[in-house]
Image: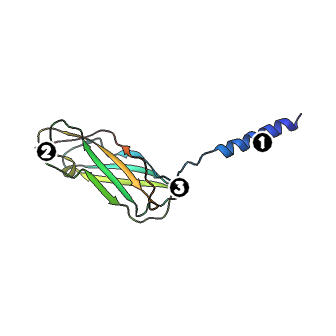
Amino acid sequence: MRVTPAIFIFSFAVVLIACGKDKFETKPRLEIKDYSSKFVDIGQNLRIRLNYYDKEGDLGGAAIIGFKDRLNLFPPGRDLVDTFRVTLPEFPEEDQGEISFELGHDRLNESAIENDTIVFRFAVTDIAGNKSDTITSDQIVVQFKP
């Protein structure tokens, strides 16, 4: 009788270990960690920090893409670049870390009559060609510069 509970507990432990999933996948994953502010005043910079998770840790030298989506109804007063493709610097292989994305007010403000409301979308492709899902930021308001 005492052997049966021990076998049951051992079997249950083996099943739990076998069914456990890796926290990290081959496909990179991004999460937004924080924002310097969700309201960017004249003269300020917007900084969005992203956490990355990648099983192989091969993001050093990889490409990250940021897309700015302006949500205002009125057309912009000037056309600014809305897609940013940046090659990350080389760094040691780590399965998790942080990426910082920063733009100044002048690169964000498009309207001379109203505040701009924007969201960013981010995705990364690691060195092996594995692409992350696209993540979307919260809404960010940029003070207009008359």
Query: Would you say 102 lies left or right of 112 here?
Result: right
Q: CA distance from mark 3 to mark 2?
A: 44 Å
SS class of the residue under badge 1? helix
Q: Inspect the image, locate mark 3, and give the three-letter code of the amino acid beneath it.
A: Lys
**Furthest residue in direction front, as rendered:** 129
Name which of mark 3 and mark 2 comes first in the sequence: 3
**Residue at 21% over, 52% down:** 107
Helix, strand or loop at disc 2? loop
The amino acid type, in three-letter code, at marker 2 is Lys
Q: Position of residue 129 (x, y in %)?
A: 44, 59
Question: Reading the chain from its start, which is encountered first: label 3 or label 1?
Answer: 1
Task: State the residue lying farthest toward the right.
Answer: 1
Q: CA distance from mark 3 to mark 1?
A: 29 Å
In the displayed structure image, the side of residue 11 where residue 146 appears, left or right: left
Residue type indicated by callout 1: Phe
Quadrant (top left, top right, bottom left, bottom right) of the C terminus? top left
- In front: 96, or 73? 73
Quadrant showing the N terminus: top right
Secondary structure state at the residue bearing disc 3: loop
| Residue where numbered disc 2 is placed | 145
The picture places residue 111, in percent across and down from the top left corner, at 14, 43
Query: At 36% across and 56% down in the image, what residue appears?
Result: 64
Q: Residues within 10 Å of mark 1 (few under 14, many from 20)?
A: few
Q: Residue at x 15, y 37 (%)?
A: 74
Q: Disc 2 and disc 1: Cα gap in Å? A: 67 Å
Label of residue 10 in the image:
1
Instruction: Tell me the residue at 60%/46% (across/down).
Output: 21
Which labelled disc corresponds to residue 55? 3
